[in-house]
């Protein structure tokens, strides 16, 4: 049990409870008992009634995870508790904190369902647990080689976030704790998790204004992915910080006194710049550490907005401001709702230093972003703030409705919402964030769909520009519309860069003139067929186009032609699928004809084949018995060769079998064999895995195979001195395709270092 402790305050925020939890001892006797300090804090925030439910959630999670260990060797329950603690520090609502405790129980519990969670803890908690469970499943396959599956998983992730923003807050807390304990994972898993964090989760935190979470995630990823650069940057920063802090201490003492004398209540502290930001700035500007003036900023926290500007006046009256370095993010907040006054000053030695002035509410919003919404109870004014912060999520849902392809949808998210972007202004001074290289047309469609459809001209900084002009940060953009402009031009699809704008243009054409789109789509497909010397009449057989309709979710041929016509799908995509289906059907007919006596091909007689009960066709009417080589265990789909043995018939081997290669000099005994069409039988195959040597690793493997209904007929394992286990497994499968599915599935298991097929 954790003992009661006093919690120090830093800038008005409680010191993280994470270290308290992992450094203190606790009892685990089937039920995890919440420690005195944690329980006291929870009661202070949410009341005794909610605390009872919290205790029940911890007991339930402890029971589900009782047999599990983390890579560090700690009981697994330490992880969900740490996640809930991070959520408490953010000031999240009780349902979110309780969902943090339970976020892994459905994933890890053998028979736990979302319905079970709802019965025990209510609909709200169950909904959040369900959402995080979907994200967890998505995350495990985020960087697999199958691009379509990757896109579908990311699609599920962003749509789950769009349904309830608290889901992503739980997931970010989950990822933060995992990154803090990343050193216990295998090197491969460390690299994968860090890359995923840097490319998806840190940008998500930034999008939601969660500056503290984003900075820590980036630095933890930086340390893992670029350890040498991380250490070099850290040494430079540590040395420079100590020198600069000595210079700033006098300024901080003087500043606090001046503000107090002016009747302004204040807290003053130093804020260090996080390491990845320093490294990127030095690389981007090709500069040294001495030229980064905001390495340490003085942060001034006051009571009100009026006090912010009053403090700025007092400070500017004492220190000389650096021209062009003042930014008012209170009057003009950043798109993620960051608010503060920034000014760069010169001290008596002429050394620049940055000062940030904000209220405590602004500070909490800067640290925790969207999560800060739950810290306040004042009502609708903060709901308006939340609505603004989540506005882009509504665009995500809109993109879902207007995008028919998973990859296209994910490209839209990663580029339009999580990539690099520029900040432009409307004529009224509202800041709009757009992806880098966006055009005035992208801006028009971001403001409103109808403004985009009726856009005729654009002015940037008062001057007329082309619609394909690349917008820059701080550009003031004005869109000139015309009622005579009935809709977009098809050429605009080549002008806009954001996926959301492309989707809106396509939707207009989809709805505007269906008959015209159908005719145009049919013509485009015919033209594409001619370019490939194909007959569309031959390709457009029902057995072909029905497969295409099913693949693209089209209800009819007209829907398919219409989609081609308005640009929803390319004529090339449809044509190549039809050609592929035709090619496979033609090949099937040819192979079937080869089995018939007397068939001819280019004047050459095809020899009669013997169809063997073991699903192999042997060239010529040999009448010999056929068996499979035990040395390589060939499967349908593998390239195979036959070898005429002495008195035992034909032995079939994989073409890459070493035994056959050694015998290949005796060419007279090599005979051509091939797999029979649509052969159905059971075959034996063996795999070898290099497995992380930790408790529960084999359980993870077994759990993954259960989903495939694979029967393990034999298994052996042994530990190695290198710290991993070698596991050999033998399976019963139908063909090489199914075996490859097994291999792909096993590669996704975190405990699996490598997996490959072996011979006897």
Image (tube, grey):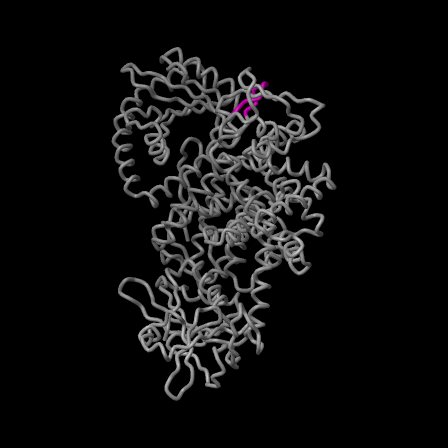
Which of 139 and 473 lies nearest the eye of the viewer? 473
Q: Position of residue 391 (x, y in %)?
A: 59, 34
Which of 364 and 749 lies nearest the eye of the viewer? 749
Q: Position of residue 277 (x, y in %)?
A: 37, 33
Q: Position of residue 242 (x, y in %)?
A: 26, 29
Residue 491 is at least partly visible in this image: yes
Q: Position of residue 634 (x, y in %)?
A: 43, 73
In this picture, is 680 found above or below 373?
A: below
Farthest top residue in view: 317
Residue at point 29%, 18% (across, down): 351
Q: Could you tell whether 398 is left or right of 645 in the image?
A: right
Farthest front residue in view: 603
Q: Main secondary structure of the magenta part?
A: loop
In this picture, is 739 found above or below 302?
A: below
Residue 260 is at least partly visible in this image: no
Q: Is residue 429 magenta?
A: yes
Q: Could you tell whether 239 is left or right of 343 in the image?
A: left
When asked about the image quadrant of residue 515, the answer is top right
Residue at point 57%, 57% (across, down): 580
Q: Could you tell whether 88 is left or right of 288 in the image?
A: right
Q: Is residue 305 magenta?
A: no
Residue at point 34%, 21% (across, down): 353
Residue bounds of the magenta highlight: 424-431
Which of 207 and 299 lies nearest the eye of the viewer? 207
């Amino acid at each position: 049990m954790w003992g009661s402790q006093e919690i120090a305050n830093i800038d008005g925020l409680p010191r993280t409870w994470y270290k308290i939890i992992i450094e203190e001892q606790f009892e685990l006797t089937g039920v995890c008992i919440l420690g005195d300090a944690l329980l006291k804090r929870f009661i202070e925030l949410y009341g005794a009634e909610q605390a009872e439910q919290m205790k029940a959630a911890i007991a339930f999670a402890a029971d589900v995870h009782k047999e599990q260990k983390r890579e560090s060797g700690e009981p697994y329950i330490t992880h969900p508790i740490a996640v809930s603690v991070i959520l408490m520090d953010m000031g999240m609502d009780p349902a979110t904190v309780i969902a943090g405790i339970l976020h892994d129980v459905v994933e890890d519990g053998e028979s736990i369902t979302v319905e079970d969670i709802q019965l025990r803890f209510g609909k709200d908690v169950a909904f959040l647990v369900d959402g995080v469970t979907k994200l967890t499943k998505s995350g495990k396959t985020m960087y697999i080689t199958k691009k379509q599956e990757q896109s579908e998983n990311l699609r599920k992730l962003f749509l789950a976030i769009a349904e309830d923003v608290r889901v992503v807050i739980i997931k970010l807390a989950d990822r933060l704790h995992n990154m803090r304990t990343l050193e216990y994972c295998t090197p491969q898993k460390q690299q994968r998790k860090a890359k995923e964090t840097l490319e998806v989760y840190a940008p998500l935190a930034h999008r939601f204004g969660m500056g503290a979470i984003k900075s820590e995630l980036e630095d933890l990823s930086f340390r893992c992915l670029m350890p040498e650069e991380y250490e070099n940057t850290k040494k430079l920063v540590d040395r420079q910080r100590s020198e600069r802090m000595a210079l700033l201490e006098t300024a901080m003492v003087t500043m606090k006194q001046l503000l107090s004398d002016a009747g302004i209540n204040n807290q003053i502290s130093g804020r260090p710049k996080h390491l990845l930001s320093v490294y990127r700035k030095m690389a981007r500007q090709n500069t040294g550490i001495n030229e980064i003036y905001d390495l340490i900023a003085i942060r001034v926290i006051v009571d009100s907005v009026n006090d912010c500007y009053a403090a700025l006046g007092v400070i500017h009256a004492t220190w000389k401001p650096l021209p062009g370095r003042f930014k008012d993010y209170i009057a003009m907040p950043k798109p993620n709702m960051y608010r503060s006054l920034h000014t760069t000053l010169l001290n008596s030695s002429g050394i620049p230093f940055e000062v940030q002035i904000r209220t405590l509410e602004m500070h909490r919003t800067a640290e925790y972003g969207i999560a800060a919404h739950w810290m306040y109870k004042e009502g609708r004014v903060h709901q308006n703030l939340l609505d603004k912060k989540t506005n882009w999520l509504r665009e995500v849902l809109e993109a879902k409705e207007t995008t028919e392809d998973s990859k296209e949808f994910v490209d839209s998210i990663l580029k339009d919402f999580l990539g690099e972007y520029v900040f432009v202004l409307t004529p009224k001074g509202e800041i709009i964030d757009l992806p880098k290289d966006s055009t005035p047309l992208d801006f028009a469609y971001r403001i409103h769909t109808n403004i985009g459809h009726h856009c005729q001209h654009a002015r940037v900084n008062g001057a007329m520009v082309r619609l394909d002009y690349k917008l820059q940060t701080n550009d003031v953009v004005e869109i000139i519309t015309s009622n005579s402009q009935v809709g977009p031009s098809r050429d605009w699809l080549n002008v806009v860069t954001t996926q959301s704008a492309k989707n809106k243009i396509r939707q207009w054409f989809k709805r505007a003139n269906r008959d015209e789109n159908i005719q145009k789509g049919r013509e485009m497909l015919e033209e594409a067929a001619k370019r490939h010397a194909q007959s569309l009449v031959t390709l457009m057989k029902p057995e072909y186009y029905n497969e295409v309709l099913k693949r693209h979710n089209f209800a009819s041929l007209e829907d398919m032609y219409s989609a081609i016509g308005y640009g929803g799908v390319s004529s090339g995509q449809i044509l190549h699928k039809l050609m592929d289906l035709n090619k496979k059907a033609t090949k099937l007919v040819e192979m079937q004809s080869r089995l018939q006596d007397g068939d001819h091909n280019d004047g050459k007689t095809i020899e009669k084949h013997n169809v063997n009960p073991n699903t192999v066709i042997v060239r010529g009417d040999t009448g010999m018995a056929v068996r499979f080589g035990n040395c390589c265990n060939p499967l349908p789909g593998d390239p195979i060769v036959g070898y005429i043995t002495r008195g035992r018939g034909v032995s079939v081997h994989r073409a890459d079998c070493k035994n056959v290669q050694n015998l290949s000099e005796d060419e007279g005994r090599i005979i051509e064999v091939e797999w029979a069409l649509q052969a159905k039988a059971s075959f034996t195959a063996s795999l070898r895995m290099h497995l992380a040597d930790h408790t529960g690793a084999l359980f993870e493997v077994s759990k993954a195979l259960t989903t495939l209904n694979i029967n393990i007929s034999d298994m052996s394992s042994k530990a190695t001195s290198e710290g991993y286990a070698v596991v050999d497994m033998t399976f019963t499968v139908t063909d090489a395709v199914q075996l490859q599915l097994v291999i792909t599935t096993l590669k996704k298991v975190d405990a699996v270092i490598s997996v490959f097929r072996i011979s006897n």
